[in-house]
Image (cartoon, rainbow, N blue to C red):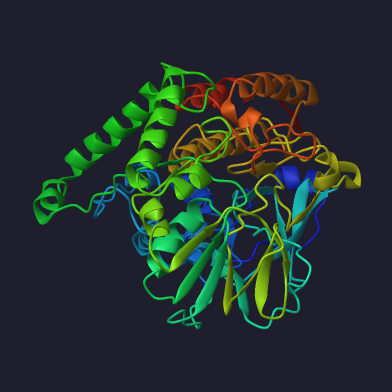
Amino acid sequence: MVRKPPASVESASALRNRPEPLSIGIVGAGIGGIAMGVALTRAGFGNFTIFEAEPGVGGTWRVNNYPGSSVDLPSMGYSFSFNNRNWTGTHANQPELLEYLEDSARRFGLYGHLRLNTTVQETVWDEQTHGYVLITEADERFRFDVVVSAVGLFSDPNYPQWPGLNVFAGVAFHSARWRHDVSLTGQRVAIVGAGSSSAQIIPSIAGQVSQLYVFQREPGWVIPRNAVTYSSLQMARYENRRRRVWRRRKFFLRFEWGFLSGAIHVAGSKRNRAGEQTALDYIDRVFRDRPDLRAAVTPQYIFSGKRRVLSDDYYQTLTKPNVELIPHSVTELTRTGVIDATGTEREIDVLILATGFKAAHYLSRMKVVGRGGRDLQTAWQNGAYALLGMAVPGFPNFYLSYGPGTNGGAPITYNAELQAAYVVRNLRRMQRTGATALDVRPGFVRAYNRWLARRNARTAWARANNYMKGPNGNIITQWPDDMLTMNLLLRLLRRPATRRDR
């Protein structure tokens, strides 16, 4: 049975003296929401509710269920410390990862805290009670002392605004809203995009369709993923929990070691140059007999300037006779086809939009109102920012999991656990001191983000067009450094950067 938090309005003094434990609202039941729920459970904070718009947990790994969906980084990077899975291969596919997330939620009793099929539209701070009112799409209202947004980086699909899209008579859908009721067998299909999702979808559907057109506005840097499915002997070896723990630790140590010689995304570093050569050698190897394709897939921007694409079969699929790479952007749709930038029209039956997400536009689907009626999107009009990706001045007791400036430097589960621990430490401080509101100091946040901007300016991300940037061209989404640095800052800056109200 789901426990609803009290909806009654209390005075600030009553709040300070009441015997009830702190109430916490979590928006999103993906990796961040699960990590937060487990951390609260283990720390003894049982009065929390997790709101999830989908019919189950998993977040990104529930909705991105297109053919071929899988992780592009090693499966170890998706293992929580509290549930170390014996993965079936180096790179888990979407069904296995979703099952793992469901198992993690089940093991720690999170299902009793879930409100599924519930979209939170608005979160409003109440200065009188020092708490937030969460308002759902169905106009239900819930009050919490603390709110954690765990909606993630890839929750709002990016839909292009092409002329004619509304008159196209065929079937059109985004890769994150896959139409499993639509058969692609024998169909003429166009897929728009050349990123990670597209690179997974194309090899998975090429054998079904009669013709596949791949519209590429700009090529991505592609390197082999080198995915391996484990044998029964390998699986049996890691049935032993200690061996799994040691394997996970080795993965994280290798990940951390990679930053010491200059991370792969640092412009001009040894690893950056080596990665570029690996990618160029891969192009030469696959397209030795196709100079036309070799030229079309070779990027003209710095290596790692965009998110790298890891695939073992994307390039090979482009050479199939029923697959045509079109190195031009889409400009318009007609009733029966797609027109590219050269004015050429190709007739199709199905259009797949692998056009990514509004990654830099955080919380684009949820309104957050803080002190003085200030809207968070107004505060972020020049680009989203936060202290350590977690807290914004003027929005007390409100935290972001995997917020601005946290992507890229650590495996997502590690990051989620670090940030959950940060919230728990603040909750304990509130309990210990009687504080009813914790707010970050604006001066610390400004100084921190100036430092972060200088660090990001060294990277290849700063030298290319990508989803990581805000309206002023500044990098919004990325963390350029290692896991240890993030861990230390989360511990060192928590108290001095925060003021408390009683």
Residue 155 is drawn in which quadrant? Answer: bottom right
The picture quadrant where one finds residue 47 is: bottom right
What residue appears at the point 80 percent right and 34 percent down from the top-left corner? 472
Please say if 406 is above or below 316: above
Residue 10 left/right relative to 173: right
Question: What is the quadrant of residue 451 in the picture?
Answer: top right
Foreground residue, 341 or 170? Answer: 341
Residue 360 place in picture, x, y as percent: 68, 44
> Please, is residue 218 above or below residue 385 in the view?
below
Please state the horizontal and vertical placement of residue 57, each as a whole percent of the image. 49, 63
Residue 54 seen from this side: no
Work out whether residue 430 or residue 415 is closer to the camera in this orientation and state it: 415
451 on left or right of 193: right
From the viewer's perspective, is 49 left or right of 342? left
Q: Nearer the viewer, residue 69 or 18?
A: 69
Residue 117 visible from this viewpoint: yes
- Foreground: 363 or 175? 175
Please tell me which residue is depicted at 28% across the width and 51% down the height of the picture: 85
Q: Position of residue 283 (x, y in %)?
A: 40, 41
Q: Position of residue 375 (x, y in %)?
A: 85, 47
